[in-house]
């Protein structure tokens, strides 16, 4: 962020500080810190640069009048609105503090740092980088445009899920799908992605797997799409010549008919995943799947340490929720459930079973759980346990592991 241009913009309208919570410590440049602090001390009441020079001298940070005038008149400063950019600068500063304390916690292991990390995490979540004045009159045009638009902002998913959610997944939503290991999280999420691609026009979808490579994901999709037993696709020498031709044709159809990308284990850090999503996202016409959240590495956090996994998942859900809102897209994350579920008499998953972090529940717009029936092998339950924009309840599906298919329960 260009601090010099921001401060130049401030010098042209010092009153901006009267309407902002701004601190000079957010700036990296010592000179910019001093100038901003001088404007803050004057409460933005600078009739001319001579007033600011006097204040800076009193602060023990004298800066020549000519230097301030030169900075004020720098070309292009009008593009760097101080009031608009200050929240982003605040966020960068808090993020650096957060990184520093996470590093201290990882090296020293002192639990006192956890409180600081928690406080900074909450602060960065509450920084509003696009402030609204709250007045209905300011938004009537935007509201009218949305109201009369013929273009749906929802992505259609499974038909019965759409009925529960009021039309499908929406921009800005973080959707969590939780299940115990081996239930079929990946199978369900791949079916969900393909249904979204089939039921919506001009949609782009990405699938990030930290357990499988690209071709393993392709095998699962082709097993469902071409009706070839998934066990055969585990080793292509099991396939007949005709089956190989069918699989090759299916691969080409995926390339030609769908705008999707499959990312394997090489995308194992939060930073890499976020960068790729930003690169490929199309507002309101894109969805990303992450399988699964517990395997994502957060730079600077040792998830194996005391409380480390909780910190990592807190950061992941917060960052992905902010990213979903920023890019106007839904993001689906898969999550493991606590083992204690297996030892309960009632094995219906609940929000309390989400592993390691309350942020999975707090940051998610929708939380769904998958579980299998104890008596009917092919019966899978999908429980919508949290839904900010619709109903909660249980749905039933027929699951076919041999052909990686999730279908209507009969």
Image (spheres, rainbow, N blue to C red):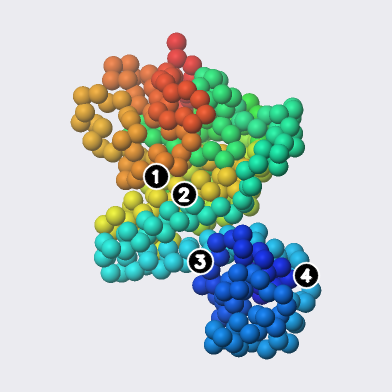
The circle on residue 76 is 4
* Label 1 crowd bin: few (<14), some (14–19), many (20+), radius 10 Å: some
Compute the Cα span from label 1 to label 4.
42 Å
- The residue depicted at 60 percent of the width and 83 percent of the height is 56
Of labels 2 and 4, earlier in sequence is 4
- The residue depicted at 61 percent of the width and 51 percent of the height is 131
* Residue holding disc 3: 93
* Label 3 crowd bin: few (<14), some (14–19), many (20+), radius 10 Å: some
Residue 162 vertical placement versus 67 (above, below): above
The circle on residue 107 is none
The quadrant in which residue 262 appears is top right
Of labels 3 and 4, earlier in sequence is 4
Compute the Cα span from label 1 to label 2.
8 Å
Q: Secondary structure at mark 3?
A: helix
Compute the Cα span from label 3 to label 4.
24 Å
Compute the Cα span from label 2 to label 3.
17 Å
* Label 4 crowd bin: few (<14), some (14–19), many (20+), radius 10 Å: few
């Amino acid at each position: 962020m260009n601090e010099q241009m921001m401060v130049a913009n401030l010098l042209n309208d010092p009153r901006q500080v009267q309407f902002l919570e701004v601190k000079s410590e957010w700036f990296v440049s010592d000179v910019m810190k001093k100038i901003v602090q001088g404007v803050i001390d004057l409460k933005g009441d600078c009739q001319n640069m001579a007033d600011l020079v006097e204040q800076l001298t009193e602060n023990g940070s004298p800066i020549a009048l000519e230097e301030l005038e030169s900075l004020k008149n720098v070309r292009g400063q009008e593009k760097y609105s101080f009031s608009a950019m200050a929240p982003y600068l605040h966020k960068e500063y808090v993020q650096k503090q957060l990184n520093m304390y996470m590093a201290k916690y990882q090296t020293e292991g002192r639990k006192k740092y956890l409180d600081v990390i928690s406080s900074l995490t909450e602060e960065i979540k509450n920084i509003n980088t696009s402030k609204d004045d709250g007045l209905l009159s300011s938004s009537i045009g935007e509201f009218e445009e949305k109201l009369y638009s013929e273009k749906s902002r929802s992505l259609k998913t499974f038909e019965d899920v759409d009925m529960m959610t009021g039309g499908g997944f929406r921009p800005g939503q973080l959707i969590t799908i939780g299940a115990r290991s081996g239930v079929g999280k990946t199978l369900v999420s791949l079916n969900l992605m393909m249904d979204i691609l089939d039921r919506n026009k001009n949609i782009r979808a990405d699938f990030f797997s930290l357990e499988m490579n690209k071709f393993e994901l392709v095998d699962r999709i082709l097993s469902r799409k071409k009706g070839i037993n998934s066990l055969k696709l585990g080793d292509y020498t099991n396939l007949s010549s005709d089956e190989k031709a069918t699989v090759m044709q299916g691969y080409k159809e995926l390339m030609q008919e769908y705008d999707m990308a499959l990312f394997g284990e090489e995308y194992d850090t939060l930073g890499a995943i976020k960068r790729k999503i930003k690169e490929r996202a199309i507002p309101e016409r894109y969805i990303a799947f992450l399988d699964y959240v517990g395997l994502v590495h957060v730079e600077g956090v040792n998830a194996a340490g005391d409380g480390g996994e909780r910190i990592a998942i807190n950061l992941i859900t917060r960052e992905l929720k902010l990213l979903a809102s920023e890019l106007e897209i839904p993001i689906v994350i898969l999550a493991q459930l606590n083992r204690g579920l297996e030892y309960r008499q009632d094995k219906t998953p609940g929000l309390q079973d989400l592993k390691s972090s309350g942020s999975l529940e707090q940051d998610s717009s929708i939380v769904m759980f998958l579980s299998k029936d104890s008596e009917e092998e092919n019966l899978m339950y999908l429980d919508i346990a949290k839904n900010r924009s619709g109903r909660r309840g249980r749905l039933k599906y027929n699951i076919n592991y041999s052909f990686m298919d999730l279908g209507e329960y009969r």
